[in-house]
Amino acid sequence: MDFSYTEVQQMLQDQVQKFVQKSYDFDTRSKLIASEAGYSKEFWQLFAELGWLAVPFSEEDGGLGGSAVDLMVMMEEFGKAMLVEPYTATAVLSGSIVAELGDETQKTGLVSSIIGGELQLASAYAEAQSRYNPLNIQTSASGEDDAIVISGTKIAVENGANADKLIIFAREQGKSTDKAGISAFLVDAKAEGVTLRGYTTVDGKRAAEIELEQVRVGDTDRLGAPGEAADALLRAIDKATVGVSAEAVGALESLLHKTVEYSKTRKQFGTPIGTFQALQHRMADMFIECQLARSIVMMAAMSIDSQDDDAEKTKAVSAAKSRVGKAIHKVGQEAIQIHGGIGMTDELDVGHLFKRVTALDIQFGDGEFHTERYAAL
Amino acid sequence: MDFSYTEVQQMLQDQVQKFVQKSYDFDTRSKLIASEAGYSKEFWQLFAELGWLAVPFSEEDGGLGGSAVDLMVMMEEFGKAMLVEPYTATAVLSGSIVAELGDETQKTGLVSSIIGGELQLASAYAEAQSRYNPLNIQTSASGEDDAIVISGTKIAVENGANADKLIIFAREQGKSTDKAGISAFLVDAKAEGVTLRGYTTVDGKRAAEIELEQVRVGDTDRLGAPGEAADALLRAIDKATVGVSAEAVGALESLLHKTVEYSKTRKQFGTPIGTFQALQHRMADMFIECQLARSIVMMAAMSIDSQDDDAEKTKAVSAAKSRVGKAIHKVGQEAIQIHGGIGMTDELDVGHLFKRVTALDIQFGDGEFHTERYAAL
Amino acid sequence: MNADFTAEELDFQQEVRTFLQEEFPADLKHKVDNNIRLTKDDMVRWQKILYKKGWAAPTWPEEHGGTGWSHTQRHIFATEMGLYGAPEPIPFGMKMVAPVIMAYGSEEQKQRFLPDILASNVWWCQGYSEPNAGSDLASLKTTAVRDGDEYVVNGAKTWNTLGQYADWIFCLVRTDNTVKKQEGISFLLIDMKSPGISVKPIVLIDGFAEVNEVFFDDVRVPAENLIGEENKGWTYAKVLLTHERTNIAGVARAKRRLNALRKLAAESPDGYGNTMSENSMFKKRLAECEIELQALEYSELRTLAALSVGNAPGPESSILKIVGTELAQKIDELVLELSGYHSLPYVPDQFEDGFEGDRIGPGTTAAAALNYFNNRKLSIFGGSNEIQRNIICKAVLGL
Amino acid sequence: MNADFTAEELDFQQEVRTFLQEEFPADLKHKVDNNIRLTKDDMVRWQKILYKKGWAAPTWPEEHGGTGWSHTQRHIFATEMGLYGAPEPIPFGMKMVAPVIMAYGSEEQKQRFLPDILASNVWWCQGYSEPNAGSDLASLKTTAVRDGDEYVVNGAKTWNTLGQYADWIFCLVRTDNTVKKQEGISFLLIDMKSPGISVKPIVLIDGFAEVNEVFFDDVRVPAENLIGEENKGWTYAKVLLTHERTNIAGVARAKRRLNALRKLAAESPDGYGNTMSENSMFKKRLAECEIELQALEYSELRTLAALSVGNAPGPESSILKIVGTELAQKIDELVLELSGYHSLPYVPDQFEDGFEGDRIGPGTTAAAALNYFNNRKLSIFGGSNEIQRNIICKAVLGL
């Protein structure tokens, strides 16, 4: 039993903290959100140089080892500063899928480009009817002449509008919720038949709806065996779920910290509101929520790294996302309430942290969904 | 729309308040619980004289009208003082069943005896496997020679050990959860084959487990038509559920009142604990719970009195019991917590109020059960 | 005890329903049903329709143009409006400044201001809160210094709802710094066109600017615009604050939203081949909201019944405010839960009148997160729920 | 970062398991599994078995007979004990007075008291709380007045757990009334057989008298029983209060109870032909408890890991106390929910050793309400959860 950080983890944490402190204040972030791309390509290059983009990959693939705990340590710091760079979309989710499903040729081309910061990816699996079941896929892929033709609509594709390439999950066989029959295809974002509708999300990231009309790809664009992409998708989502849970833990910590500090300076009726015991005990409860969220995300990360059994990993991930979701509602709402009106304004960071954690609750399934999934497992 | 009390309701409330103030302090109650019968026969006679036992009955049956609102007004006061007399068992539950199912002969004999305070009844429907489904009945009744023979085991029969007569719900036909096939039989408590195991309940009432071994009754002991007692049972339970919900509202009010008063006198760190804002806001929340509980019980009582549709009534009753159940957990637990250790002691009334409301939550189905029933209706 | 309406009341209910069906403009109904914000013109148009019908001011006495309705009729009217989705008139003129003018204003002030409020000719806004006061209203710092026949006003007000539309603002201002904070406050009416007033929108986290800061820089206000006596303003405002706040519980609105929620659940796939209305856990959360709403509704009816027999409104309104806002926020959470990924796009403009871009997602789900964010204000504004709990502790529990 | 045990630790875990299976008496196991209370003899018998094995005092230094285990080993030991249902030794001697004696007692006192604590020859109880002090411990009023070589003690202590069995009591007493309340307190060891001591049981709402009041009427205590210096008692006690409280989170016990709960659900009919383990709402509540337990467990492991690398225990123990007790109480509620009518009979005697009457209902369900009532104490005693929140506010949040 060892809960200490490795040297690499310590380094990652220090690096992100320094980066945030030096280069990523709230103003900078706001400007990035308002910019065309919605994130900083310059920072992305820095991430590559610092090796952050290599974190999700195994050493064989040229990465730092692919440990979920490493990811957790780093993404918690991302969360504190509400980074808007598409780390989850490109490096974690798409990266894991490529690493697991890609053949040597595909991997050689893609993984090193991701690690090098030269390639943006987006994974498109969710559809309007799929809610939080990533295997609910109606987008179809069928052979026609020598090509494979993909048609369907994808929603909530994080980084969709900025991606060079899209990983499209489409059904080659089976009914809409079958596990078997789902394939992953690498599609150029500019391919004919691809229509992207990009938007900013409530928490300042970028995402897109993607319409695929008779998009033609070749056999070599398929990642993995035909109809067998589901397991890799689920595993990638589990790992990314630990990542966003850690991101949420970081953001919750920021919310707690800012609320406590505000309560020490904000005066009402002649005294700082932080001296009112009713508010004090509620802040103590926020602290407890933050600690429990942190603990269970550590549990899930360690489970991903050490468990062999996929079902056990999934259960651990659902436990974490469930508990973090509860903390998100409680800590997020209390932070706004204790701040009062000022916490509702666009110009203060607290409201944006609240929006970020709310979006993280939804990503990959909200707390209620994961509680049910846990109970069913 | 009129939320004021009628003269009768005002009178009932005054009467009970005066009775409690004069004759029913905590010591008296404790002695009654320790007495052999577990309640006061003298008080019971007084209830008869004051007309309280006539409240659940229609005017045709010699009662005061049978209004659920009347019942609510009175039982709320019962609840404040935690009465242990078997009012619900004899007058409300069994009384309603007899009034609805009995033929003229049966009613003449029984209803006036109930109203006159001469007869104690107990309704036995629950069984070990039935949880909160009163129609889950395995106790069987079958014809044999000229008699009907009843066998089975009943649990949680309130007033069972003190009853002169038992109303036994037994199945003449159908599977164990069928609505059709359930009959009600009037059985002498001393009849051969009846074994009673009486006990005191956690909230100071009396109840019994009843074993029925080949108990022989006649056709004239059946209340209502063969196999058609279920609806009357459900209606009687709905009405009694409003009664115990009102009882709970009264007890919750006592808990709130005693907690607030205690907090004004109990000092910690040099000041009354009622000045600590964290506790103040929790007491405000207790007050809110009490008010919401009261409001929804009024809604259910009015629904019983004015609605024609049984399903609507049942839904209103489940709404009330669900919400009251929530209030019971919150207010009961907070009352103990704010009192601290002293609230846990047998010698103070607060702990007994807590036990009473906990038992009332369970009676006729707890809050969670009724929330689910409401959602399913 | 019964919750039934009389035959006359049922007739009235029917009259209100017919009126709403016939007179509430279809384009406004469309906007309300699709989460599109109403413009100032929309609101004024609707209020003038009510005025024409004679129903603009249910809470006013008849002498000033009120309806002369009983408490029950007012309740029926508010309920039917809420259920139909017809917005209540903006409260700042009708319900906030008018009662103060009626109670403490001079005859001239009544003649001058009340008819235009009734007819929705003049849009009012409220100038109470200040940047550093928050829930501690009485600590306000905006000053009004008497100079001849005028007051010179300096300072800033905040959380000024819809002040961008306002013609007039009613303000609490400090006219005496030397006494206890409550005793140096006056109640002043100020023309928003006065030189020296500037309005700065405050964008909230849902992307809308429904509140403002209002700055006063040597604004000269005729002394005739003072209500009542100088330094008595806090007393007047307090009366207003504890004045019957109709519909504070928001029961009808909550009913309407729960109906919409049920409909949305029936249309929302659960991802596994069923809809969310078949998800037993979601059904239970919905049931809990419905049950809470009934408890709230009957709490409101109890208050109403007490008013009807002449009792003064008590601290019950604090309960209604707390429970009503917490329930509204819970409903927001359930809508958000159903909306999921559909609620993530941040395109506030698509909920503005005249948006011509491509809409992303259906109105209900696309607005879910924004509504969830925006409605956090419910437990903060209008006397925060903490303040309401303090009131219960003091006024009811004697703590 | 990993939560795995080393090979040696796994061996040790196996050793503990084997020991428990072989040495924990079957009659005690039967009692524990059936909610029957252990008698004093039961507890002493088990503690002497642990003593014989050399495992009586995992938290003591080796020089006094401790095990010399690492923090991880202690954790493994506590976990296995909890999972198996073997009770922890009564803490008053082993974990409460012994550390104080070790730290502040004289050599004579160590010789005199520690071996008998280790061997469970002497039963200790705690004399801290007083009838009018509650959470405000330092306001205690029991006095000890020096008279020659003795102190004369007068006053009353309360919430004295299992004092009816005790041979000795350790007390905080007031030795100086003229200074700040914390500065006039001394730490005194008193023989329960001293003339003038009387013990009055306090029956709790579950019908049991597990706590007592202890009265001191001119009780003469040899001055040699004073720990450390006069008037320094508060310092000593505070050290004890913040001393590592092993197993305060109750993780292993909660795991054991959740296992039992799952089993009970599978055996509990829902009344409609299925069991409660098929009720999706109940399953969800159970899942929430399991998830909370994992969050709690890893919070405890984090604390343990920090201890293992030499960090002092911080205010984390307040979190563990709050979350652990609230979870235990939530489990009580779920057991009660499953038990329903079966939990209503009030027959406390049937859970006492040697009860020969007819038992009503199976142990788990019949004890459900009594356990629910009794365990409300968890959030009150041992530093109420309000006090724990105050500690977090002060020590962590700087409020």
Image: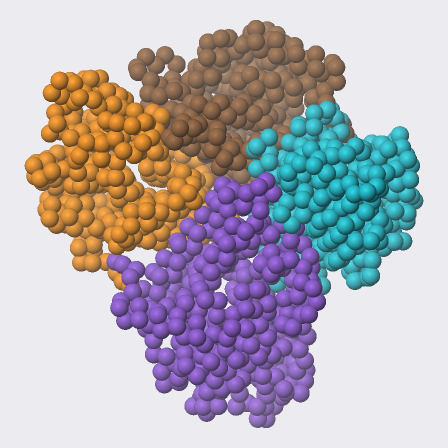
Chain colours: A cyan, B orange, C purple, D brown
Residue visible at 17% across and 38% down? B101
Residue visible at 38% across and 64% down? C314
Where is residue D218 shown, x and y percent of the image? 42, 26
* B272 displayed left or right of B187: right
* B323 displayed left or right of C157: left
| C106 w.r.t. A352: above or below | below
Residue visible at 61% across and 84% down? C192
Residue A56 seen anywhere in this rendered image of the structure: no
User: Where is residue D236, by image quadrant?
Assistant: top right
Who is closer to the viewer here, D166 or B126? Answer: B126
Tell me the quadrant of the picture where the N terminus of chain A can be found.
Answer: top right
| D193 w.r.t. C42: above or below | above
Who is closer to the viewer here, C327 or A25? Answer: C327
Q: How many numbered marks are there?
A: 0
Residue C342 seen anywhere in this rendered image of the structure: yes
Residue visible at 34% across and 60% down? C302
* D83 displayed left or right of A196: left
Where is residue D56 shown, x and y percent of the image? 60, 13
Where is residue A81 shown, x and y percent of the image? 77, 51
User: Where is residue B139, by image quadrant?
Assistant: top left
Where is residue D323 shown, x and y percent of the image? 57, 36
Tell me the quadrant of the picture where the C terminus of chain A can be found.
Answer: top right
| C12 w.r.t. D349: above or below | below
Who is closer to the viewer here, C262 or C139? Answer: C262
Q: Residue furthest front?
A: A145
Who is closer to the viewer here, C230 or B228? Answer: B228
User: Where is residue A195, by image quadrant?
Assistant: bottom right
